[in-house]
Image (cartoon, rainbow, N blue to C red):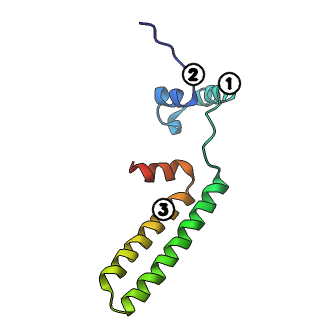
Amino acid sequence: MTRTLTLTTSTFRDEHGDPATWSAATLDSYQVIGDIAPPPPLPFTHREMQTEAKAWEASAAAQQRLADELAAKGHITAAGIHRRGAQDARQHAQAARLGWPAYEAFLNGW
């Protein structure tokens, strides 16, 4: 069985551990590998993730307004459902503000 090794920045980090402990030579090697085999681009840019966060914030605000209206009319159960929806939307927005890797981790429960 032949094992093919692919040189990527991820495999380099896996082999060398925490970048905070790297020597100057290790950092240089990592940079060279990044030039030779750069990591694939993220599926969403930082700007796109900020737009996503704004959409989640708008959803949270709308759900919170609806929850408040329902609570004022005495519909406690329905208000609670929309409050939880608003809380969930705020959590999505918070993760999206940090960029795709954090948002993906949030979505996958990592």
Q: Which residue is mark 2?
A: 7
What's the residue type where badge 1 is placed? Ile
Asked whether disc 3 touches disc 2, contact meaning CB atoms under 8 Å apart, the reply is: no
Amino acid carrying label 2: it is: Leu
* Disc nearer the start of the sequence (3/2): 2
Label 1 or label 3, whichever comes before in sequence order: 1
**Sequence-wise first label, 1 or 2:** 2
Q: CA distance from mark 1 to mark 3?
A: 35 Å
- Residue 79's place in the image compared with 93, above or below, is below
**What secondary structure is found at the residue carrying circle 2?**
loop
Residue 103 in the image: state x and y as whole percent: 50, 53
Amino acid type of the residue tagged 3 in the rendering: His
Q: Residue at x 67, y 26 (%)?
A: 32
Relative depth, front residue between 69 and 100? 69
Percent of width and height locating residue 74: 33, 91
Q: What is the distance, in whole Å, between disc 3 and disc 2 at their CAs? A: 34 Å
Dot 3 alpha-carbon crowd within 10 angstroms: few under 14, some 14 to 19, many 20 or more = many
Q: Indicate the position of residue 50 as horizontal and vertical percent values.
A: 62, 60
| Residue mark closest to the camera, 1 vs 3 | 3
Question: Which secondary structure, mark 3?
Answer: helix
User: At 50% from the left edge and 13% from the top edge, which residue is drawn?
Assistant: 4
Mark-to-mark CA distance, 1 and 2: 9 Å
- Toward the top, the furthest residue is 1
- Residue that protrudes farthest toward the left in the picture: 77
Disc on res. 92: 3
Q: Are marks 1 and 2 in contact (CB under 8 Å)?
A: yes
- Residue at image point 37% right, 72% down: 84
Answer above or below: position of 89 versus 31. below
Camera-nearest label, 3 or 2: 3
